[in-house]
Image (spheres, grey):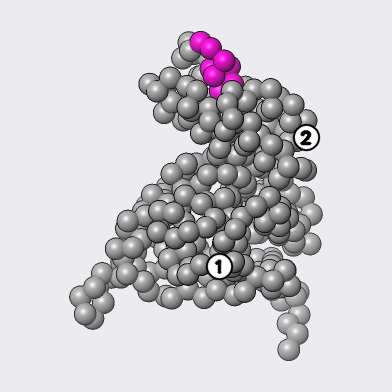
Amino acid sequence: MNIPEDILTPAERAELRLRKLYSDSGYRRYRMARFEPYDFYAAHRSFIGGRILTFADTDGRLMALKPDVTLSIIKNYRGGEERLSYTEKVYRDTGSSGEFREISETGVERIGKIDAAAELEVIGLARESLEIISSEHILDIAHVGYISGLLSATEAGAREKLTELLRAKNAPGIRALGLEGEAAKVWETLADMYGPVEENADLLRNMALNAEMKKAAEELILAGAGANVDFSIITDMNYYNGIVFKGFVPGAASAVISGGRYDKLVKALGRRGGAIGFAVYLDSIIGETV
């Protein structure tokens, strides 16, 4: 039965089109259990970024109500090459109001051997997803390895503060620290940097202070064609290790797409391989879809 799209909300129309996109691209549907043991999610609470809604099962076990899809996927990963898509509702607090919310998400995860082609495939799907959501959209991209390499070239006592100022895009704050040397100049430049990756490619290469930064710069330049470079989008470096990106559309108060390379999470969960994926926050889609 064909459903007339004019009776659907923008988010519902986008969801149907996104699910078809991912299915046509070879991504198998993953379905998450409604309840899962709390201990597993508690051990990785920092990845979730909020409180977890819990209850006691009939046998006394503490259970969690669907707090995160990516953790569930990696927990159940048994090796090999996987292309998975999902559409789920998760439950956690927003971190601002302190209230629990039901959050509707759809997205993809590619797990196994992640090379440049795999990254380009997933980032390409993120672009197509943005195009489905709105004809006007922006994709911002960065690379965790570039900052990781920069941190290793920075005096230890200033690293935490510099990272905080970078996320706030506070170049004056970085200058006010009065640090000297090449690394300090790079931090300040990155805090001011925003614009097409192609226009910043030479600067990213020239500012690389070590092999890790040079490698990250080339990966970012390759994967980020057509996107804007913005290092303020980097958040949890304990789980992410490569390309990270966020997508924005008019009318949405925050990113409608968020994703990246998270090999560190796979390793933290005792699995082998790499992983890259993204989530689309359906609740943020309020305008007309294409």
> Which residue: 73% across, 42% down?
222
Which quarter of the rendering shows the N terminus?
bottom right
Is residue 184 placed above or below 258 in the rendered structure?
Answer: above
**Residue 34 at x, y percent in the picture:** 42, 75
Residue 76 image position (x, y, % from top left):
45, 70
Q: Which mark is residue 30?
A: none
Give amino acid for label 1.
Answer: Gly
What residue sits 71% from the left and 54% below the top? 117
Q: Quadrant of residue 108?
A: bottom right
* Residue drawn at x 57%, y 61% as measured from the top left: 112
| Three-letter amino acid code at the position of disc 2 | Glu
Say left or right for 177 vs 258: left
Left or right: residue 64 versus residue 16 is: left
Foreground of the two, 13 or 110: 110
What secondary structure is found at the residue carrying circle 1? loop
Q: Main secondary structure of the magenta part?
A: helix
Q: Quadrant of the C terminus?
A: bottom right
Confirm whether the magenta stretch covers residue 54. no
Q: Tag 1: Cα neighbours inside 10 Å, few (<14), some, or many (≥20)?
A: few
Instruction: Residue at 43% x, 19% y: name it.
Output: 155
Reading the image, the residue beneath label 1 is 80
Image check: 107 left or right of 100? right
How many residues crowd mark 2 within 10 Å: few (<14), some (14–19), many (20+)?
A: some
Q: Nearer the viewer, residue 123 or 283?
A: 123
The answer to whether one can see residue 104 in this image is yes
| Residue topped by disc 2 | 198
Q: Which residues are magenta?
A: 180-187
